[in-house]
Image: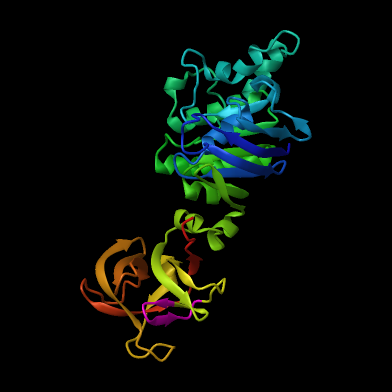
Amino acid sequence: MQIRVVDIVKQFDPRAKGPVLDQINLNVVGGELLALLGPSGSGKTTLLRIIAGLDQPTGGKVFFGEEDASGLRVQERRVGFVFQNYALFKHLTLEENIAFGLTVRDRATRPPKAEIRRRALELLDLVQLSGLGKRYPAQLSGGQRQRVALARALAVEPRVLLLDEPFGALDAKVRRDLRLWLRELHDRTGHTTLFVTHDQDEALELADRVAVLSQGRIEQIGSPDEIYDHPATAFVHGFIGESSALRVNAREGRLFIGDRPLSIPLREERPGWGRLFIRPQDVVIGEKGLSETGRPPIEAEVLSLWRSGPTRRAELALAGEAGRIEIDAPVATPLTPGEKVPLHFKRGTFYLETPAA
């Protein structure tokens, strides 16, 4: 089922500085798993609730396939919704929780009891909880409860599956296990799925595509590789992955830190000040002496060192007002805080500052 979001605007308080959602356009391909990623307050949960029909937009439309779903009630949209806090009924067994959406249908559309039970048991097997149908939610772990919540969403045979921070209440190990399981489940069922998360690792690992939101707008939509390797804006680069930003100047077709030129190519030729985003692996400690430009290398002072898994991280301060960066430093390379080291910049992404209006 394809989902199209057209010119969606949401304004909760007309006295607020801006809308919660500002002219959102989104096309979700049928059968894909798309992540809505962004910091708290970016509008991602509001967008998900509007698609579900739980909130109404101030302007714009939502289409399911060719059908305008904007005026349809939640039940008529046939969406499966999974919340962060599971929202299971404590007094019902797992089997009864999964079957709930079918048992409350009106008599004309309600399946026979035998069919409802068959469907519940089938879904328990699908979410790898066979034989636990008579248990109650309190008897399960958090990860198991979230699987039941997903089975309940699937029971109503939804056209679209929507998940709002589905793993937010779980610890890191369980989150990772469930991420892998959800991806496998999605590939088996083929539901068009949108999930909200503020966890970039979750989005990049799970999704076919990622929509990055900030302040009610979509900054970029693309595959995980496109989002990470080719961020379209400074916000996306700073939000996705690890990076440091240096204040640099573009002139004469080159980038400069102070009066020292860098060999990093410019994406645009306009001169001016901006920010150069550097990932930890983009800078290496070089040899002392002249750089490839024939000038003394750019030097930085080692501020601190710490272990990061199999590698070591170093925080460095560049001279002047360029800023600080974190780089990967080989464990075998001797470094001490206060030491001055020469740096070689292999790559980076420059974003020109936009003059204030």
Between 242 and 220, the residue placed more toward the observer is: 220
Q: Is residue 215 above or below residue 105?
A: below
Residue located farthest toward the front when viewing the structure as drawn: 357
Say how many tags the image has. Answer: 0
Is residue 126 in view?
Answer: no
Between 150 and 3, the residue placed more toward the observer is: 3
- Magenta region, residue range: 256-264
Q: Is residue 304 above or below residue 39?
A: below
- Residue 232 is situated, as x and y percent measured from the top left of the image, at 56, 59
Residue located farthest toward the top when viewing the structure as drawn: 107
Residue at 48%, 78% in the rendered image: 251
Asked which quadrant contains residue 23, the reply is: top right
Between 111 and 22, the residue placed more toward the observer is: 22
Answer left or right for 26 relative to 251. right
- Residue 49 is situated, as x and y percent measured from the top left of the image, at 57, 30
- Quadrant of the image for the N terminus? top right
- Residue 68 is situated, as x and y percent measured from the top left of the image, at 74, 30
Residue at 52%, 43% in the rendered image: 179
Residue at 44%, 88% in the rendered image: 292
Asked which quadrant contains residue 341, the reply is: bottom left
Q: How is the image coloured?
A: rainbow
Between 311 and 336, the residue placed more toward the observer is: 336
Residue located farthest toward the right when viewing the structure as drawn: 66
Asked which quadrant contains residue 247, the reply is: bottom left
Please tell me whether residue 217 belongs to the stretch shown in magenta.
no
Answer left or right for 196 relative to 61. left
Is residue 18 in view?
Answer: yes
